[in-house]
Amino acid sequence: MDATRTPQIDYSACLGADPGAPVRGGATRRQVLQFCAGVAATMGLSSAAGVRMAEAAMAPARPPVIWLHGQECTGCTESLLRATHPTVESLILDTISLDYHDTLCVGAGQQALDYKHAMMAKHKGAYVLVTEGGTPMKDGGIYCKVGGRTQVELVREAAEGAAAVIAIGSCASWGGIQSADPNPTGAVGTHAVIPGKLVISVPGCPPSPYNFLSTLLYLLTFKRPPELDELNRPKFAYGRLIHDNCERRAHFDAGRFALEFGDQGHRQGFCLYKLGCKGPETYANCPAIGFGDVGFGSWPVGTGHPCYGCTEQATAFRKPIYALATVKTLLPPTAYPQVGTQEGSGVSPGAAAVLGAVGGLAVGAGAMLLKQMGSAKQDGSDTPNKED
Ligand code: FSX
Ligand code: SF4
């Protein structure tokens, strides 16, 4: 590394006098810094940006958040709360001030609604609005109401005083499952309810809580959204096709497919394209960061089921689950494992290791760090490398 071009980063100010002291959600200052450094790496940012994120995450003043639910299954909140590793939801819930959440609020009825209005008035122009679920527009929006008011009214009212709006999940991003043909309630995503206001979309059914937290941390730190694609999805998470990072990609390129669930090819870990895998038309980082923080391969394709394209408006709930995908990239990516030399051995450990290394380092560094946080040593040996 060229020391003349890479400034040394002083982590000591961020770590404070006692790096092992709990600071957020039971996590220590060192762990928060580690996590944020990983988030920064995942987003393609510098280590210095990770330090700034950690400082924002540990700041005493917590940004207010108003969280509304519409038409959905509550799986987005559930996936966030049920993360295998407790630190994700702890960090989210302790980094922000969750002033109102339709599902998690302790109060009920008018008391809860009055509190929501009081918080929106108190933090007018400063709070982050998170929307979960679709919004029905048909027949005056009568198909989803809270406290006698339609979801359309509630979203518009809350968006009015919001500094930023994040749509979590595919329902809030573009309507989700209830917008499937014939879309009986006229369900749409939040962006269609408040045209003219930027809505950062973090789709997935459910979405990765890690992507949500990374987006939130960036927003809180830099007071602007991360780089977005044309659908307003953060590029760090939705910038690459699943197909280009998949551990089964070598089998696709070699023409080795599972043709039926349970057949020889399926048992050997061959490509799931002919079972309807939508990886070739779906942008997401699932192969790299997985779900549930339980290690490499913990995502649908990794467990033997085709991807159904939940992050894509034109795919999930639009195309039949087992219909063939549109292959968007014909050339193989430059960095992916070679076809195994031994037929019938499934995804070779070597191939998996190579892809795991490439994906883990380039895309999922933060997730890898997150997994290690639970076993982080307390003797200082897990302090980020100052040469990074
Ligand atoms: Fe939608 Fe959230 Fe799918 Fe469910 O609440 S993204 S139905 S898994 O989880 O909004
Ligand atoms: Fe992986 Fe699906 Fe692409 Fe096959 S079609 S390589 S299983 S993403």
Image (spheres, rainbow, N blue to C red):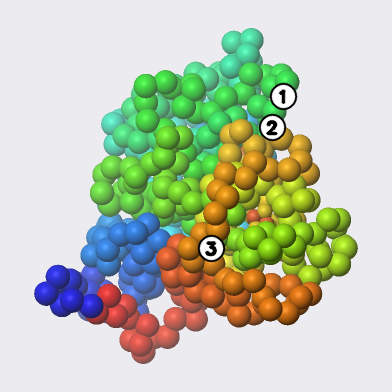
Instruction: Name the residue beneath numbered marker 1.
Output: 181
What label sits on residue 318 in the rendered view?
2
Compared to residue 80, the image places residue 168 above or below, namely above
Disc 3 secondary structure class = helix
Q: Name the residue under label 3.
A: 288
Task: Using the image as rendered, state which of residue 40 and residue 261 is in the foreground.
Answer: 261
The residue carrying pointer 3 sits among few (fewer than 14), some (14 to 19) or many (20 or more) residues within 10 Å by Cα, namely many
Indicate the secondary structure of the residue bearing disc 2: loop
Q: Is 13 displayed left or right of 236 in the figure?
A: left
Q: In this view, does 5 lie to the left or right of 60?
A: left
- 3D distance between C-alphas at marks 3 and 2: 25 Å
Q: In which quarter of the image is the N terminus?
A: bottom left
- Give percent across and percent down for residue 6: 17, 71
Q: What residue type is labelled 3?
A: Ala
Q: What element carries label 1?
A: loop
Q: Which of 3 and 18 is in front in this view?
A: 3
Q: Verify CB contact (< 8 Å) between mark 2 and mark 1.
A: yes
